Amino acid sequence: MHIAAKITKVVVDFGLVCLVVVALVYTLGALGAVLDGPDDVQAAQDTEASLNDALAQAQAERPELWTQEQKERARVAVELVVRR
C-alpha cells in the first residue's frame, strides 16, 4: 500500500471515529433531557412541601418551644431554602 493510501485510510478512520463519538454524545444528551427527573419548579415545590411538613411535625410535637415569632421565622427560613 502506498503512503498516500495509508494516510487517506487513517484520515477516513479518524473521521468515522469522530462522527460516531459526536453521534453518541448527541444521543446521550437528548436522552438526558428526556430521562431527567422533575424540573426545577417541581423539585422546589416538593422541597418546600417536605420542609413545611417537617416544620409542622416539630411544632406539633413540642408546641411549648415555638412562639408565634419563631413560627414565622421558620416559615421564612423554609422560603429562603426553597429559593436557593
Image (tube, rainbow, N blue to C red):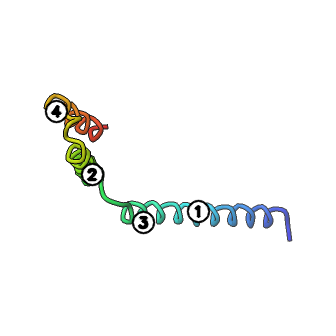
Q: Disc 1 versus disc 2: distance between alpha carbons?
A: 42 Å
In percent of width and height, residue 69 lies at 16, 28
* Callout 2–callout 4 Cβ contact below 8 Å: no
Q: Which residue is mark 2?
A: 50
Name the mark nearer the viewer: 2 or 4: 4
The amino acid on which the numbered mark 2 sits, given as a three-letter code, is: Ser
The amino acid on which the numbered mark 4 sits, given as a three-letter code, is: Glu
Q: Which mark is residue 72?
A: 4
Q: Give the side of residue 4 with respect to residue 23, left or right.
A: right
Q: Which mark is residue 21?
A: 1
In percent of width and height, residue 80 lies at 26, 34
Q: Disc 2 versus disc 4: distance between alpha carbons?
A: 17 Å
User: In terms of sequence position, does the residue under pointer 3 or pointer 4 come before the other?
Assistant: 3
User: In terms of sequence position, does the residue under pointer 3 or pointer 2 come before the other?
Assistant: 3
Q: Is 43 drawn above or below residue 31 in the view shown?
A: above
Quadrant housing the N terminus: bottom right
The amino acid on which the numbered mark 1 sits, given as a three-letter code, is: Val
In percent of width and height, residue 41 lies at 25, 50
Q: Which residue is mark 3?
A: 31
* Callout 1–callout 3 Cβ contact below 8 Å: no
Name the mark nearer the viewer: 1 or 2: 2
> In the structure shown, which secondary structural element does the residue marked by tag 3 occupy?
helix
Q: Disc 3 versus disc 4: distance between alpha carbons?
A: 43 Å
User: In terms of sequence position, does the residue under pointer 1 or pointer 4 come before the other?
Assistant: 1
Looking at this view, is 54 or 80 the one in front? Answer: 54
